[in-house]
Image (tube, grey):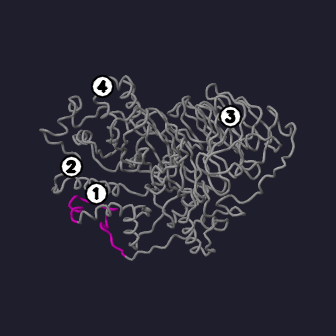
Amino acid sequence: MKRVKKLLALVLALALCLGAFVLPTAQAESGVKAKFGAFAAKTSDKLFMALPVNSAWSLYSMPISGGMLTLIDTASHIDDVIADANGNIYYLRNNGSVYQAMMRAADGNRVVAAQFAEGEIAHTLSLYAGQLYCLVNGRLNAINLTANTVTPVSDVEMTSYVIADGIVYYESATDQAEYQVDSRLQPGSMVQGSSGRLYSMMLDGSSNMMLFDQGASVLSAYNEYVYFHNLNDSYIVSSDTQEWLDGCLYRVNVQTNQYIKVLSQYDWNYRPTDYGLVVYREKSLVLSDLSGENPLVIYEPDLYNYMAILDDCVIIYEYNLKKLTSVSLVDQQATTLYSGDFVSDGTAGELDNVSGGNTAATAIPTDTLATPAPNATAGTTAGTTTSATARPSATAKPGYTASGAMTVGATGEAVRSMQKRLVELGYLKSADGIFGEKTAAAVKKFQRAAGLTADGIVGSATLKALNKSDAPYAPATGTDDTYIFPNSSSKKLTRDDILSVDKSLWPYARNEIYARHGYVFEKSKFAEYFASKSWYRAGGFSTKDLNSVEWYNMELIADMEKEYASSSTPSATAKPSATAKPSTGSTTFDKLPDAVKAIGSDQYIFPNSSTTKLTKAEIRAIDKALLPYARNEIYARHGYSFTKSNFKAYFADKSWYSAGGFSTKDLNDVEWYNMELIAWVEKNG
């Protein structure tokens, strides 16, 4: 990803898939990406891994080629292990009451880099430009490793994030997009899902803006691309008894603002690397090129595993098989590093080498675990004895009752899945994977509606009630039965129709169309307004339910909002029609390159770009000035409404162009291929 010198307005579609894409100015060295934690990390000579053993989690090290284990730390939970270039290790730990960010130096000394307040939940640790970052109660914080201080980056709530070239790309925890598709397990019912929209901001918290007006999750950054799961292009993942939605893997080129679908199949985990795109699906680990082509199965892991995709290898612990494996991305060879149980013995390891922060060394449990002989198999550890220091008793994890029911403080995908269902039913506004007081209040409301004990604790009875097809929706509270435009779902509006109502109502008229379909609003002004409508029922929204008339009307209203925002007294006929040629003189069209203006009003640059794959030779044969227009010509065929003045003027000149009703779902594989190829030629020549 090259350094961004100025504010770029990269505009994509408002319709099904694309939103305004604007990159803030980057401040960091080009090509620098954050490293994120996983269950394992490695230095030049050692492998580190965090694994559950009995009732606790332990952090181990071993030689990079396998062999003897050394116990480093034990706690209620350990996660997000990261290694830097100097041999230092960073990780998050929870000792039962507070979260800590730890640093284990190359010499073996451990330091509490940061300790968070009781009740704060820390997760998603990353290392960028010499600082640690993590989410604390859903908000990004920076940890200064020199001063051992924690500083909030922003008060924006996010579910996941990546950092690249001084820019934070994140999935919003409050601005959610919701989807539903037909159930496979229960014909006639719907599978619903939601995910936060994609935003960006500078690393100092400034220039916060939406990039992608659809649900985006599981983010990753590599070179000039940001990869993500696109919930607008979703598929059903199912077992024998459960099913849920996930998004196909997409990537956006942040230099050319082009989106492309990378994978049509599902994936459970992925990461772009210098050796290609690594993708994990159920029982296969696949290495392909970065665009998803030429896949090669490099390992077939057991279904039950922990997996860390590192820079040049994949570390897999198959816990039913009790096997630790390293799969090289360089030569695709798999090496067994360790087999057998992780059992207790009396070896001291590094448990006592801790300092820093405001936590005494004794706060870290002093029990010890396995130090088996090299490549030991199950039951062959040498010199096994029992430590005199007993392991802490098995108590409930923070946020869970002794029986395993979720309550305040719980985090993770199970929480998020439960929250999504509450959102679908209208009890909650967003799903962030953190069980807080708002979630508890929503649970109690649902429990009352379902006839359960309203204790705010989600156990088996509450989960069963939530997942019923006839689970009770949150009651509508409004009494107003009026609409701004009663026919906006069935009849195309005109400019005169829209001008007939006060301009202050236009944003509500546009969102009225979403509200008809149950959209859950995050902005308080819209949430309060539509809550007053007796016809509004929050939940179950899907863009698939919007028809072409509704898309047309929303876009027309949005265009007029922009038009009247930039001009105080435009006339009702001031805006040219979609097919009218711009007037001559000092217009935007007149300022276009000569090669661009030479294309006739009824012509295409590549007439067959929607049906036939282009070649590099064909693309290189035309004037370079035409390339951006040839790429966007594919969007224009499907009614994309342009906001950049040069594209807007050029396509307004085309008799075949009609703005409105655009959806990326109408783009076929040939069109995606051609857009990506044209973008490649634009960049590389």
The label number, if any, that marks residue 577 in the structure image: 2
- Nearer to us: label 1 or label 4: 1
List the residue tagged with mark 1.
557
The disc, 1 or 4, on the residue closer to the chain's N-terminal end is 1
Q: Secondary structure at mark 1?
A: helix
Give, as a three-letter code, the residue at label 4.
Answer: Ile
List the residue tagged with mark 4.
622
Which span is picked out in magenta?
480-500
- Membership of 484 in magenta stretch: yes
Give, as a three-letter code, the residue at label 2.
Answer: Ser
Give, as a three-letter code, the residue at label 3.
Answer: Leu
Give the residue displayed 37% in from the left and 65% down from the top.
Answer: 525
CA gap between label 3 and label 2 equals: 64 Å
Q: Position of residue 101 (x, y in %)?
A: 60, 47
Position of 326 with respect to 375 (left or right) is: left
Q: Residues within 10 Å of mark 2 (few under 14, many from 20)?
A: few
CA gap between label 3 and label 4 equals: 53 Å
CA gap between label 2 and label 4 equals: 30 Å
Secondary structure mostly seen in the magenta stretch: loop
Position of 644 with respect to 3 (left or right) is: left
The label number, if any, that marks residue 567 in the structure image: none
Give, as a three-letter code, the residue at label 1.
Answer: Ile
List the residue tagged with mark 3.
47
Position of 546 with respect to 262 (left or right) is: left
CA gap between label 1 and label 4 equals: 37 Å
Most foreground residue, 328 or 475: 328
